[in-house]
């Protein structure tokens, strides 16, 4: 079977091609599994700069939803993310 005939997985919001673009930063900020530290490693943009980009490029209601989501999920920081993963593993095996 040729590669072009393979079925393609549909993704609601696919990852933008360029990691230097604002679109990629917004996509990564919305993604639950990408931490602020990973965004900084790939683009050298700090958390406060990401927040400013989100505030500037999103509608006010979307920005409020994003901030609420980031604050409640508490996995946008690597330390909290690894702690959540450990707690999740313990719950599964207990």
Image (cartoon, rainbow, N blue to C red):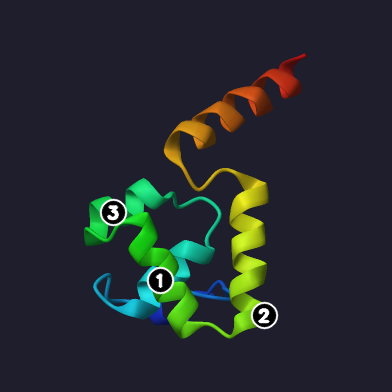
Q: Which residue is mark 3?
A: 40
Up/down of 55 relative to 38, above or below: below
Residue nearest the observer in this picture, 48 or 28: 48
Q: Mark 1 or 3 closer to N-term?
A: 3
Binning the other alpha carbons within 10 Å of mark 1 as few (below 14), some (14 to 19) or many (20 upward) gives few
Instruction: Using the rendered view, name the quadrant where residue 89 is placed.
Output: top right
Label 1 vs label 3, nearer the camera: 1
Mark on residue 12? Answer: none
Quadrant of the rendered image containing residue 32: bottom right
Q: Residue at x 62, y 51 (%)?
A: 71
Q: Is residue 91 left or right of residue 84?
A: right
Residue bearing mark 1: 52
- Measuring from the top left, give residue 94's x and y in whole percent: 77, 14
Task: Of the two numbered discs 2 and 3 on the same chain, state the one appearing first in sequence.
Answer: 3
Q: Residue at x 44, y 64 (%)?
A: 28
Q: Quadrant of residue 92?
A: top right
- Viewer can see residue 90: yes
Q: Residue at x 35, y 47 (%)?
A: 37
Give the residue at the far top of this rendering: 94
Give neighbour class at mark 3: few <14, some 14-19, many 20+ (Cα, 10 Å): some
Where residue 59 sits in the image (x, y, percent)? 58, 85
Q: Which residue is mark 2?
A: 61
86 in relation to 20, above or below: above
Q: Is residue 36 above or below residue 13?
A: above
Of the image marks 2 and 1, the number of the one nearer the N terminus:
1
SS label for mark 1: helix
The residue furthest right is 94
Q: What residue is at 60 percent from the left and 62 percent from the top?
A: 67
Q: Nearer the viewer, residue 21 or 67?
A: 67
> Is 56 left or right of 86, judged from the image as shown?
left
- Secondary structure under tag 3 reads helix
């Amino acid at each position: 079977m040729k590669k072009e005939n393979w079925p393609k997985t549909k993704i609601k919001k696919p990852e933008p091609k360029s990691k230097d673009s604002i679109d990629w930063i917004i996509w990564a900020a919305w993604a639950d599994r990408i931490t602020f530290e990973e965004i900084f490693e790939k683009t050298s943009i700090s958390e406060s700069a990401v927040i400013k980009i989100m505030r500037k490029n999103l509608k006010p209601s979307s920005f409020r939803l994003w901030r609420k989501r980031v604050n409640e999920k508490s996995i946008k920081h690597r330390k909290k993310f690894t702690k959540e993963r450990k707690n999740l593993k313990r719950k599964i095996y207990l």
